[in-house]
């Protein structure tokens, strides 16, 4: 499965947040991104906001071997 991510730098913010969150599962990533947005940025957990998050998700490149 391809790893997916969302990058806070793509959203306008007075905090200039640089957090990026990744996961292998769409629901897991959306849940984590919503928790971050609510607790750090004061957003509200609504179906419309979750849809916005889903549209901002990207696929990562192939994993690199570090060993």
Image: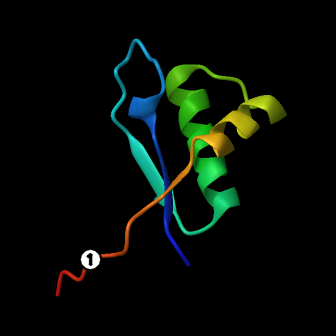
Which image quarter is the N terminus in?
bottom right
Under circle 1, the secondary element is loop
Q: Which residue is mark 1?
A: 64
Q: Residue furthest bottom?
A: 67
Question: Would residue 13 be visible to someone looking at this image?
Answer: yes
Q: Residue furthest top?
A: 14
Q: Position of residue 38 (x, y in %)?
A: 61, 29
Mark 1 burial class by Cα count in 10 Å: few <14, some 14-19, many 20+ = few
Q: Is residue 23 above or below residue 55?
A: below
Q: Is residue 41 above or below residue 14?
A: below
Which image quarter is the C terminus in?
bottom left
Number of numbered labels in the structure image:
1
Residue at coordinates 56% horizontally, 31% vertically from top-left? 37
Quarter of the figure with residue 48: top right
Question: Would residue 46 be visible to someone looking at this image?
Answer: no
- On the rendered structure, is 55 left or right of 22? right
Q: Is residue 51 above or below residue 26?
A: above
Q: Position of residue 54 (x, y in %)?
A: 67, 45
Residue at coordinates 47% horizontally, 57% vertically from top-left? 22
Q: Residue furthest right?
A: 47
- On the rendered structure, is 17 left or right of 65? right
Who is closer to the viewer here, 39 or 19? 19
Residue at coordinates 44% horizontally, 17% vertically from top-left? 13
Q: Position of residue 9 (x, y in %)?
A: 39, 31
- On the rendered structure, is 23 left or right of 10? right
Who is closer to the viewer here, 58 or 66? 58
């Amino acid at each position: 499965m391809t790893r997916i991510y969302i990058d806070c730098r793509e959203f306008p913010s007075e905090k200039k947040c640089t957090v990026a969150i990744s996961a292998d599962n769409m629901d897991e990533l959306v849940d984590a991104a919503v928790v971050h947005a609510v607790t750090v940025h004061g957003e509200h957990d609504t179906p419309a906001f979750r849809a916005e998050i889903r549209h901002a998700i990207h696929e990562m490149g192939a994993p690199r071997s570090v060993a």
